[in-house]
Amino acid sequence: MNFKHAALVSLLPVALLSAVVAAEQTTSLSAPHTIEPKLYVTKPQKLGNGRAWVYVALDARGAPLALGVSMEKGALEGLPQHPNTTSRCFDRNRNGRMEEGECIGDYELRFTLPEGEAARTLAPFKWVGLNWNPHGHPEPAPKPYAAPHFDFHFYLADQAEVRQLRPGACGELIDCEDFRKATKAVPAKYVHSHHINVGGAVPDMGNHLIDSKAAELAPGGKFTHTFIYGAADGRITFYEPMITRDYLASAPNMCAPIKQPQAWASDGFYPTTYCVRYSEHTGRYTVSLERFVQRKAS
């Protein structure tokens, strides 16, 4: 183990949250803050009664320490309580209006990774989608995922490719032709065997390969946080920690391993853990991908 790198990771939450607070005073997306580790922070967007940012943390050598989302404490308050009737909708009964069950119902913020060193280092990751789901996910998603929660999508596919997945009558309201494309099997070596296809393909997003061994799917299990691989057209297209609002509000401080595939389709740095934290000092929540390892395509 590189002990200097490990020490930076352990200090990351304190340094990170300080940098995000400082970022409120800047409009730059590409200039790093003069703090160790180097932090690149996007412009904020309104979320609930607060704001959210995406950040990239690099060590002194330019290797990634974290890619994540930071949210003010107020972001968990004042959130919409009813599904979004303009989000990923399809008029199944063709009556000219959107009714219950005809919209996925999420509220989404999209962030492009900061340009320059941060984007180059974290390729193939390209952008982040933060989704608030006031009524959770409908079937075919497993029932525990009906709880109000956030999806943190860290995309490897670009936005234009994701937008090609149109609304329709299949899966989770996706066009049936696009459903077949989204659920095309990922070669076994590129996804951990526990992550399986349950037909959870979503328009303007992709398929969701859930962890079949996740604690919340066991009898009596409770959904607090989980990790999902996203896919489309036989490729992994996003990494997704999925976190309930109640769990975030409990002020957690945890990291969990990401189950690793046997191989990777593209060269780059890939995370081995995801973390969920709250800092009382700064009043910030963070959800991040961390402990990156450089992989070669095979």
Image (spheres, rainbow, N blue to C red):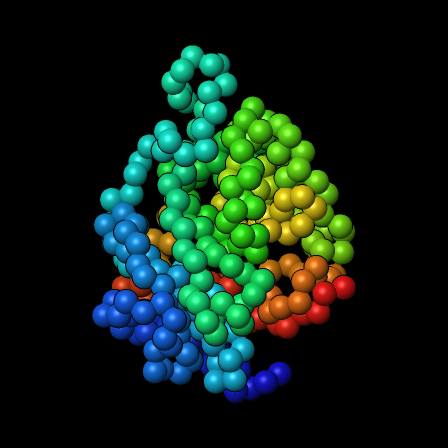
Quadrant of the image containing the N terminus: bottom right
The residue that appears at 60% across and 41% down in the rendered structure is 207
Q: Residue at x 51, y 59 (%)?
A: 126
**Residue at figure coordinates x 42%, y 66% from the top left:** 114
- Position of residue 141 relative to residue 119, above or below, is above
Horizontal side, residue 283 vs residue 29: left or right: left
Q: Quick one: 219 or 170, which is closer to the camera?
A: 170
Picture quadrant of residue 38: bottom left
222 to the left or right of 260: left
- Residue 229, how many percent across, how many down? 60, 51
Res. 144 in view: no
What x and y, as percent, mark residue 135? 40, 35
Q: Compared to 203, does 225 lie above or below?
A: below
Residue 225 locus on image (x, y percent): 49, 51
**Rendering coords of residue 161 (x, y %):** 56, 46
* Rendered position, 237 above or below 11: above
Q: Is residue 89 visible?
A: yes
Horizontal placement of 186 versus 284: left or right?
A: right
